[in-house]
Image (cartoon, rainbow, N blue to C red):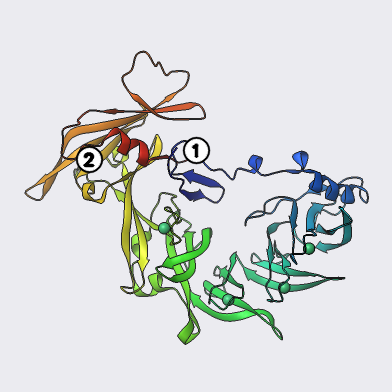
Amino acid sequence: MKKVLSLLLSAVMIISLAGCSALSLEPEDILSLPNASGDESEIISLISSSYSSYEPVYPLSGENKNAVIIGDIDQDDLREAVAIFRKPDDPGSITLLFAREQNGRFVSMGESVIQTNLIDRVDFVDIDSDQTEEILIGYQGASSALRSVAIYEIGDEITVTDVPSVYNALIYDDFNADGNIEALCIRLSNDSDISKACLMGYDEALGLSELSSCEIDSDTASVKNLISGGISEGIHGAVLDCETEDGIISTQVFYYYEQQKTLLNPLFVYGGYSDTKRSVPILSADIDSDGVIEIPEIGLMPHLDDEKDETVCSMISWQNYDFSMMALSEKSSAILCPDPVFTLAIDGAKEGRVTARYEKDERTARVYEWESSDGKGHIGNELFYIRAYSKAEYNKDRINEVILCEMNEDIYTYLIEDADSLLSFSGEEIENNFALIK
Ligand SMILES: [Ca+2]
Ligand SMILES: [Ca+2]
Ligand SMILES: [Ca+2]
Ligand SMILES: [Ca+2]
């Protein structure tokens, strides 16, 4: 419908802030081998010509989630590819088949076997800055929970360099603005080591090796989201959403401080970190596509002290890291309704002056004025409601409600109850600011 914004809800789910036009990274939307393109079929036939049976292996994370990944490592318009598969008679290892385009078709360059059960990610990255990309394979180590990186350099021959046990989560980017790509690795604690973020750069003599590292919260049990981008005006870095054993999500930010040649975690070290703790799985993202990542703080909307929490909607306060203040500052805010699940961005002037309740059984969220006097608040007039129907139960003749959005089996509608309040919402305001969470 309107502007397209997206944020991650969980590792594989994406919320759309674009009304009905949700983005999706569901596996079925990613080209899979049964629907392989002509090029992919050609590469697969290279496998099937050697093996009577094989099982495609799909990388777990990163941008490339297909079992056949094609790129052009040296920008010569002849493509290179890697296909990932498992042979049934060797279930403890995964085979990589490398191919390159020659005279209009793909030819095999050879195979490499990794002793692993899991390929985490595949990236085409020029990690040694020689103007040709390497194929970097992140895989689960055989003996450690940490993942390793195998760097495949594709030339007349294929050479492989292994960087063992380096990460639980990883992202590649130019973190120190020198034009070369580094790897930012998150390593969660084990008995012998603290949890840390580690920036690794390529060195001629040492290979991919540590430039600097910093401590991260040791309560982290798993990584939900690691993204790079602007973390503050003019500062490039990474944002990490982690989860504890108890399901509490929190956010840390990283950037490389060039003068001291040090990787910093300012939110965790200098404060503000505890405000990001939340039980709702909303993850950090550049929600307005301005190049700077927003971090969510989530709390309940205004409510009475004795009111039952389970009917009160939440408020997402999207924060940017303010480098000069070394603190978070609010960018925008939105109502978050847990059931039916949606967000509605609201004008900052209305924040604290409206509240919302949801009726799970009726699949309805109602937005009210919130009136404060004598330091106490109470619910005022109902301004509007948003309601979800299944398509089967929706009866268009019976209802005055305006259709907001149709998504899959549901129809979302709204009805303005009070258009005269100083806090009233127009239909356009509701339509433009509504977004579904898948
Ligand atoms: Ca090429
Ligand atoms: Ca290179
Ligand atoms: Ca760099
Ligand atoms: Ca932004």
On the image, the x and y values in percent for residue 62 come to 62, 57
* Left or right of residue 388: residue 104: right
Q: Cα distance, mark 2 to mark 1?
A: 35 Å
Secondary structure, mark 2, is loop
* Left or right of residue 146: residue 329: left
Q: Nearer the viewer, mark 2 or mark 1?
A: 1
The residue under the point 58% across, 68% down is 173
On the image, the x and y values in percent for residue 412 come to 40, 29
Residue wearing tag 1: 21
Residue 248 position by quadrant: bottom left
In the rendered image of this protein, does residue 266 appear above or below residue 16? below
In the rendered image of this protein, does residue 326 appear above or below residue 309? below
The residue under the point 40% across, 71% down is 268
Question: How dense is the environment of label 1, judged by Cα within 10 Å: few (below 14), some, or many (20 and up)?
Answer: some
* Residue type of the residue flagged with mark 1: Ser
Residue 217 appears in the picture as rendered: no
Residue wearing tag 2: 307
